[in-house]
Amino acid sequence: MRRTVYTEDHEAFRRTIRDFLAKEVVPHFDDWTRAGLVPRELYRKLGDLGYFGIEVPEEFGGAGITSFKYQAIVMEESARAGVVLGAAGAHTALALPYLLKFGNDEQKQRWLPGFVSGDTMTALAMTEPGTGSDLAGIRATARLSEDGTHYVLNGAKTFITGGYQADLVVVVARTSPAPEENRRLGLSLLCVDAKSEGYTVGRKLEKIGLRAQDTAELSFTDVRVPVENLLGEEGMAFRYLTHNLVQERLGAGAMSHGTAKAAIRFTTEYVKERLVFGKPVAAFQNTKFVLAECAAEVEALECLLDKALEAFEAGELTSADAAKLKLFATETAGRVTDKCLQLHGGYGYMMEYPIARLYADTRVSRIYGGSSEIMKTIIAKDLGL
């Protein structure tokens, strides 16, 4: 079915991104995967391309386009090429929404120009060694100094996408004890300069997939954070985090759709060329049936995604709707990549084939941004259960 969610402007942007990936990313991606991160120069090139500034207001160096569809296109095209852009997605989809919505004019003037150019890379630090989906259990603390000029931050974070190369990190910390009746109170967002004394980047974590996207452990020992770096109001972080989860889950849906679609593309090309018993793998009925099933599932996912994109643009995508999309999209991508890898036989298990990379990369989508089990809980609650 013909997609109507994108305009000609979107498709022109798609062509630009596709050309950029073919020239600047694909030829080097294997090296970046082995290194476990992309070079900083890639981020500056993405800044020059205008990618980081799409949603940033013009007065801060951006284009001022309030549309998530451009982000979705980058996700689709990255999957189509079988690559990831390091932590660029976390920079734009995770950290930026907080800077835009909760930052004051002075903070935006201070941080956004560097954000747009790629000279200041950002990350969002929520997860802790003992706290994943239970954000109310965050233990990192930020105590306000007696003279009220700065916070003293202590604690640790883990699984921080982009944390290894980040210059500015939005940290969720407890600024006041949580009352027993509501553990969600007392959390705040602090923007922490990675050059601060006491700020330590720990291990660059070795992951199953997304290996060119650096993921790190961070620790804070008496880190002084100026009060001017508080985002929004003190104690309101849990509400802020909930606000952005709808967009984060929409992004997970878009990425999963792109991955599943790419898996079919790569597999269709492979089975036409691979010979078994003297004929192409594509000639066997099982191959045709499996790919037909995958195509039908991805088409259904595409319809749901496009409806969600339109609802989000209209400000109508609810938390439950986003959970439905993320659940269906990530589970579908998991099934499709698994079936497509099977059609590759032993070669599908080799990292030199794109399907292996897609298979490994998409597995975490059922965990990050809220696990599939959390999505089911949200949906069940919306059903009144």
Image (tube, helix red, strand yellow):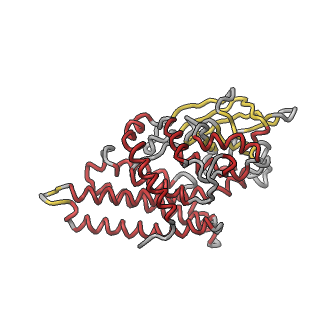
Q: Residue at x 53, y 65 (%)?
A: 325
Q: How far across and how far down the image is residue 180, in percent?
A: 78, 51
In the picture, the quarter occupied by the C terminus is bottom right
Q: Residue at x 55, y 43 (%)?
A: 47
25 lies above or below 255: above
Residue 139 visible in the current orientation? yes
In the picture, the quarter occupied by the N terminus is bottom left
62 with respect to 186 (left or right): left
135 with respect to 376 (left or right): right
108 with respect to 365 (left or right): right
In this view, the residue in front, 70 or 319, is: 70
Q: How far across and how far down the image is residue 88, in percent?
A: 53, 45
In this view, the residue in front, 343 or 109, is: 109
Q: How far across and how far down the image is residue 190, in percent?
A: 72, 41
81 lies above or below 311: above
Counting the numbered discs, the total is: 0
148 lies above or below 7: above
> Which residue reaches farthest top?
197
Residue 130 visible in the current orientation? no
Q: Residue at x 20, y 65 (%)?
A: 284
152 with respect to 216 (left or right): right
> Which residue reaches farthest right?
147
Q: How far across and how far down the image is residue 276, in percent?
A: 16, 56
Quarter of the image holding residue 280?
bottom left
365 lies above or below 288: above
